[in-house]
């Protein structure tokens, strides 16, 4: 039964996502907040279907830590679940993602309408500059910037050295950083079809102010909080 439910959800996701990619692409001429609201609607339906088919829900802590204005948020990346949750939980946001996602038919069209910062991960220096330059512009427009500092999904219990681009953007702009930890990888694994029923816990941490002129120290503070909180959520 668990396999059947997971398969049913996967079929829905693979049909719903390209369809909504086209719908979101059609909102290109509209203000960004409307485009983002359309993406949020898409993600809400995915999470509802996940709950209905696989019995997998979620609970959120720390929403009061989201400050007014536009800031940087750095998330643990261990699943596909958080790529849906971020659209539901955050105010209008743009994401740093690998540029190959923009080349996907239908899905890439919708992503393009959401103005992500699409980087070439093989060109580390130029990608960092791209995050900083485009990130400054997005923040100035009142949009949050979301970064997965590990760069790719990691298995539960694992961590990678965090990339510096998010911390460098925060230092360059004086933006605060909201760290986010969760245990989604224990329920929706990065590889594999089966979804485990239960309740994913996601926590918004207290804002971290950038250390002036020290992106590495800022990054270390973010990683220390996220890694500790993830370990707590998994215990």
Image (cartoon, grey):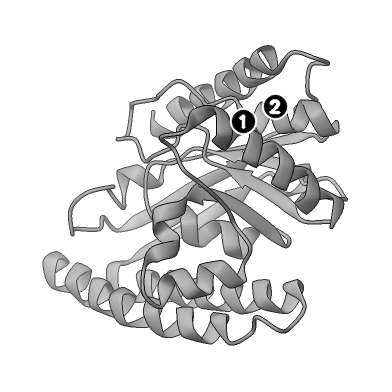
137 to the left or right of 89: right
**Could you tell me residue 220's position as x and y percent?**
60, 16
Q: Residue at x 12, y 66 (%)?
A: 3
Task: Please name whichever residue, 38 or 57, is drawn nearer the observer in this view of the structure.
Answer: 38
54 to the left or right of 32: left
Q: Residue at x 83, y 34 (%)?
A: 173
32 to the left or right of 182: right
**Could you tell me residue 28's position as x and y percent?**
65, 80
**Could you tell me residue 168's position as x and y percent?**
70, 26
Viewport quadrant of the N terminus: bottom left
Q: Which mark is residue 165?
A: 1
Quadrant of res 34? bottom right
Viewport quadrant of the C terminus: top left
Against 54, is 20 above or below?
Answer: below
Q: Residue at x 18, y 72 (%)?
A: 7
Instruction: Using a 10 Å C-alpha cutoff, classify the residue at mark 1 as few (fewer than 14 neighbours), some (14 to 19) or many (20 or more).
Output: many
Task: Please name whichever residue, 167 or 221, is drawn nearer the observer in this view of the structure.
Answer: 167
Residues at badges 1 and 2 in contact (C-beta under 8 Å)?
yes
CA distance for labels 1 and 2: 5 Å
Asked which secondary structure carries label 1, the reply is helix
Q: Residue at x 70, y 37 (%)?
A: 132
Q: Which mark is residue 168?
A: 2
Instruction: Using a 10 Å C-alpha cutoff, classify the residue at mark 2 as few (fewer than 14 neighbours), some (14 to 19) or many (20 or more).
Output: many
Asked which secondary structure carries label 2, the reply is helix
**Could you tell me residue 136's position as x and y percent?**
78, 43
């Amino acid at each position: 039964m668990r396999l059947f439910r997971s398969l049913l959800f996967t079929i829905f996701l693979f049909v719903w996502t390209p369809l909504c990619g086209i719908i979101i692409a059609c909102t290109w001429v509209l203000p960004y907040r409307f485009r983002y609201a359309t993406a949020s609607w898409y993600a809400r339906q995915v999470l509802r279907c996940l709950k209905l088919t696989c019995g997998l829900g979620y609970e959120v802590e720390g929403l009061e830590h989201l400050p007014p204005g536009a800031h940087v948020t750095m998330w643990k990346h261990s699943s596909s679940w958080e790529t849906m949750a971020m659209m539901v939980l955050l105010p209008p946001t743009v994401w740093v993602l690998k540029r190959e996602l923009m080349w996907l038919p239908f899905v890439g069209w919708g992503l393009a309408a959401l103005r992500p910062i699409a980087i070439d991960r093989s060109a580390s220096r130029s990608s960092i500059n791209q995050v900083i330059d485009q990130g400054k512009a997005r923040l100035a427009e009142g949009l949050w910037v979301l970064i997965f500092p590990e760069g790719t999904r990691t298995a539960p219990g694992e961590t990678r050295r965090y990339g510096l681009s998010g911390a460098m953007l925060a230092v360059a702009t004086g933006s605060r950083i909201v760290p986010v930890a969760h245990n989604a990888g224990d329920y929706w694994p990065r590889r594999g079809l089966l979804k485990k029923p239960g309740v994913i816990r996601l926590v918004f941490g207290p804002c971290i102010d950038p250390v002036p002129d020290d992106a590495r120290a800022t990054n270390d503070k973010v990683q220390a909080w996220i890694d500790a909180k993830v370990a707590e959520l998994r215990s």
